[in-house]
Amino acid sequence: MRHQKKGKILGREKGPLRALKTALLKNFFIYGRSKTTLAKAKMIKPFVERTITLGKKNDLASRRKLISIVGDRALAKKIIEEISSKYLNRKGGYTRIIKLAQRKGDAASLAVLELI
């Protein structure tokens, strides 16, 4: 039973799911947007929002937490200085999901997750 276990699992075990989340998060912050399936975009959106909120604090603890989440000092610095600084006066809702057409091969619904 999955009592009190929130979030989507997308048919993966714990390790591959964590690797997928980290990879999607890194690619999103490197390129500023991410074209993926709708389910993956909905799964990664809360993590992106929390990461940007963490970057807005701009103290040592949040910087270290960002480095542990993202795994790259340069990317954590980019999140704090460039991305989070744009949203200092905004309380939340930094991203949007735009639905695209279905993929031809397997008819999966695609979406673009991007910064507002």
Image: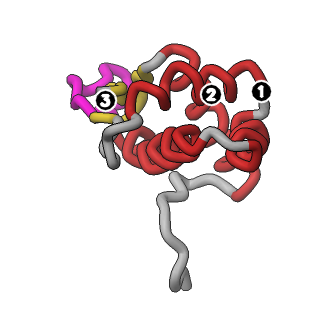
Mark closer to the chain start, 2 or 1: 2
In this rendering, which labeled residue sits more in front, label 1 or label 3? Answer: 1
Above or below, 16 relative to 88: below
Q: Secondary structure at mark 2?
A: helix
Graded by Cα atoms within 10 Å as few (under 14), some (14 to 19) or many (20 or more), the crowding at tag 1 reads few
Residue 77 at x, y = what percent?
68, 24
Is there a contact, CB below 8 Å, between mark 1 and mark 3?
no
Mark closer to the chain start, 1 or 3: 1
- Magenta region: 97-109
- What is the tally of numbered marks visible in this picture? 3
Q: Name the image quarter holding the C terminus.
A: top left
Residue type at mark 3: give it: Ala
Is there a contact, CB below 8 Å, between mark 3 and mark 2?
no
Residue 57 at x, y = what percent?
57, 45
Q: Nearer the viewer, residue 33 or 1?
A: 33
Above or below, 98 relative to 90: above
Residue beneath label 3, please? Answer: 111
Residue beneath label 1, please? Answer: 72
In this rendering, which labeled residue sits more in front, label 2 or label 1? Answer: 1
Q: Residue at x 62, y 28 (%)?
A: 26
Is there a contact, CB below 8 Å, between mark 2 and mark 1?
yes
Q: Residue at x 58, y 27 (%)?
A: 79
Q: Magenta span has 103?
A: yes
Residue type at mark 2: give it: Lys
How is the protein colored in the picture?
A: secondary structure
Residue type at mark 1: give it: Asp
Q: Residue at x 40, y 39 (%)?
A: 41
Residue beneath label 2, please? Answer: 26
Graded by Cα atoms within 10 Å as few (under 14), some (14 to 19) or many (20 or more), the crowding at tag 3 reads many
Q: Quick check: 88 left or right of 58?
A: left
Residue 71 at x, y = what percent?
78, 33
